[in-house]
Image (tube, helix red, strand yellow):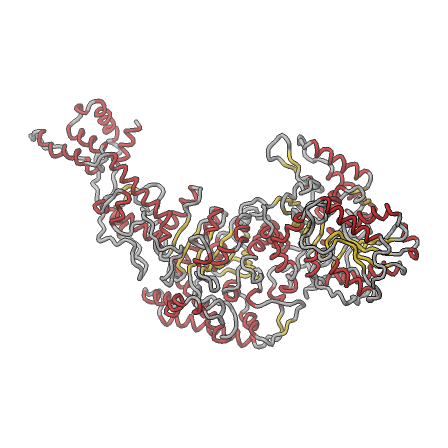
Amino acid sequence: MHRLRTCAARLRPLAAPHIALNFSHRRPAAAGLPRTFQPIRCYTAPVAAEPFLNGTSSNYVEEMYYSWLENPKSVHKSWDIFFRNANAGASPGAAYQSPPPLGVNLSGLSQAQALVGTQPSVEKLVEDHLAVQSLIRAYQIRGHHVAQLDPLGILDADLDSFVPMDIITSSEKLGFYGLNEADLDKVFRLPTTTFIGGSESALPLREIIRRLEMAYCQHIGVEFMFINDLEQCQWIREKFEKPGVMQFTLEEKRTLLARMVRSTRFEEFLQRKWSSEKRFGLEGCESLIPALKTIIDKSSENGVESVIMGMPHRGRLNVLANVIRKELEQIFCQFDSKLEAADEGSGDVKYHLGMYHRRINRVTDRNITLSLMANPSHLEAVDPVVQGKTKAEQFYCGDTEGKRVMSILLHGDAAFAGQGIVYETFHLSDLPSYTTHGTVHVVANNQIGFTTDPRMARSSPYPTDVARVVNAPIFHVNADDPEAVMYVCNVAAEWRATFHKDVVVDLVSYRRNGHNEMDEPMFTQPLMYKQIKKQKPVLQKYAEKLIAEGTVTRLEYEEEVAIYDKICEEAYTRSKDEKILHIKHWLDSPWPGFFTLEGQPKSMSCPSTGLKEEDLQHIGKVASSVPVEDFTIHGGLTRILKGRAAMVESRTVDWALGEYMAFGSLLKEGIHVRLSGQDVERGTFSHRHHVLHDQNVDKRTCIPMNYIDPNQAPYTVCNSSLSEYGVLGFELGFAMASPNALVLWEAQFGDFHNTAQCIIDQFICPGQAKWVRQNGIVLLLPHGMEGMGPEHSSARPERFLQMCNDDPDVFPKTSENEFAMQQLYDCNWIVVNCSTPANYFHVLRRQILQPFRKPLIIFTPKSLLRHPEAKSSFDDMVDGTHFKRLIPEEGAASQNPAGVKRIIFCTGKVYYDLTKERKSRGMEETVAIARIEQLSPFPFDLVKAEIEKFPQAEVMWSQEEHKNQGYYDYIKPRISTTINHAHPVRYAGREPAAAPATGNKKAHLLELERFLNTAFNQDAFRGQS
């Protein structure tokens, strides 16, 4: 029966009229572009229909076929020939031969019988069809290599002029598939993996090739066949192969022209008014503006309400003006050198500033919020920051599928290929706690990086090849074809809305000027820039095309240009009235309601960060329990939870429990807590255990922190990918979205932050000064000399302290009541090294309860996590208690201040080494030890009070780090200022060194012994001034 169905399927009629009709609607080839393969003529292939093969006669045909199978002679000779021809592979029309008229001898059928012999064998027919399928697949895989992508016509976008063997550029190449020129007019059935037939299931080979060329070898190059999902591949094939897909309405073309006018004339206006100013214009890639607007329009149509964008400097002012719709006068006044800054801080250059704007999308008539993130010159650094902010906005509005909030990232070709952060950001794209459910990446591919040729800038064919690692389709498009750009961007936006995965649009363009407007590109790219000088601008080309086809008249076009020029001139006149630059008008992440209308804190005080006893008890019980029934935890974890319960019972906390109390209490108060980093769920040192794993059921987990209170905020704790740069940038972006969240990033070891140095140096440290943008992100950096070698010891505190903005030579003049809070408000970030769990608890809570937001850098311990003395009582955490910026000497030395010969200031873990040594030497009454818990802002007032307690004491700073590292260079001048340089500040610590720590355990202990000896040797500095 299967064989019959196969035969019957082969016999179904192919309606020739439909084929002929379809051929008459061919898309014209792009003007001026040579066709890859020039067919001399194109035949339709009319096929005779079989009037006998219909529903009413099928039973009869079936009976005849069965009879013929049993005995070919049992049926009429004409049926015998028909079935034999059909089985041999002849087309149905050719297989059918009319029976001879009455009276004609059957021998007259010899000519008809000969047909069987002339029909191709089944094997040949199958081979030819397979060859055609391979040919179709070749275009789908490699057609982009011969697409006409470079507007200048001098470079190959893939850096290779080689034409793949399996792409048909001449009839001779048909031989690669075992075909020849005679096969061009044969009709072939199309496989289900192509849509070039439209409504037709078969086409002549010549037409198949023509349609493949039109789909894959013109101004659009599509890379997608590496995607391992058939549904996604089919979706893309349909979008680009289906005949007639790139048809635009009159209104769409006119809108596109208007957008091109604005994009082009904006740059020309800036060039006329400020010809000697750097602005990193968009000339040569003006179609970027309609590209972005098309993506936003289509996304808005699909339900997106908020778009967060990140981009480099090139074209930024144009995007601000024509996409975000920043007031033109606000942009123009940035060029005025006499403009005064109204806000505190350094500010930033105009092409780094961001913007936030909510408006009506004119195409969809829906509200949309557009945010362009401020960013530094460090290309691509903003990528993970945008993703983090996008994730946060999705989180806060309950958008679990990314249908309401999305991100668009713009890139340069050289940076997209060269910067590793691009790869790190891509690898966050599908991770559960990091996915933003698809990002549209747009590459402004100038085919040059400053002065560097692409052949020197990348090893891959395209700058976009990094996107292949996450199965993101890549659409290359000639940026001098605005309609192709518009179509590709529509498809990209639809892809994101359909599959919620990343997609890349590669706008292959050029850079009409040098790297900036003052740069001379002819030094290094003479041939390219000779061609660019001859190149007709894309607006002129597109306008001429639309005028020629009658879409607009020349008068209408000139009116459109005049209208926008007038808008610019009027805005320029208004801009002259602007005398003051308000950086806060360029804020990319406003926090409505958090500050006063003037942008100031609503108060300058911080309430107690302590908790009620019952809250501590309740959170402690949750921390020491498994709130899910029938959940089997690891035996070792059972002991840990019992230990926690015992601590709660005795009203004490260790480091992990102190953290639990801080997180749990904030969650109970409705503050979202998000902890991210490598292995943070368990903790690098196996101390945290915030995610419990069922030992009997795979992937079954429990997070007790989410069981504290029915009305609590959710707790997110997530192990990150093995990335610091990307993940820290992501968390920084997450913290930007709302002040009412505690967002923490923990490094596996403190020194691992150095691979994220760009985020720290360019965003976290100066972010508020540059962009008037506060951020409360917390960095947890495990730090301490434990004899673990150079790479797992130092969090490099000296770097963070060097970047603090407080003056070492000035004792702040602030009233006693406001001293601590004013210092915090004035600083660029807070740096602490807590020595007790209680102080760690308080500083985390203070981060949310203070009336403004500052980044918080915490050097966290390793050995102190389990140190028997590193525990705190509930008494230090209850109502009325606060974070202690300095913990004074409270032992025997404080009872007899006059007898104290030396006061040692220190911070962090070394305190426990010092107290142990002091006790062993019996010097508890003669040496005082004070802990500076908050290093920056420096607690001048408390240090002064502590020194004044011990009038006879020599002042010393002790640290376990090397002298050229750690805190000494920061602390010494500030203590000197505190005591008016009355006497020297002594040093006890390791000697200067290049490496942070020794790799030899014995050497480590010997160094410790030496500096402890210095710290308690009263004669160590005798005779020194």
Identify the residue at horizontal 32%, vertical 43% (top origin): 134
In the picture, measured across the screen, residue 539 lies left or right of residue 893, that is left
Choose between 953 and 814: the one closer to the eye. Answer: 953
Q: Which quarter of the rendered picture does the N terminus lie within? A: top left
* Residue 644 place in picture, x, y as percent: 76, 38
Location of residue 117 with respect to 36 vertically, above or below: above
* Residue 241 place in picture, x, y as percent: 35, 49
* Residue 193 place in picture, x, y as percent: 36, 42
Q: How many marks?
A: 0
Residue 853 visible (yes or no): no
Choose between 224 and 887: the one closer to the eye. Answer: 887
* Residue 61 place in picture, x, y as percent: 23, 29
In the picture, measured across the screen, residue 35 lies left or right of residue 520, that is left
Q: Which quarter of the rendered picture does the C terminus lie within? A: bottom right
Choose between 395 and 541: the one closer to the eye. Answer: 541
Location of residue 331 with respect to 613 vertically, above or below: below
The answer to which image quadrant residue 717 occupies is top right
Identify the residue at horizontal 74%, vertical 37% (top origin): 624
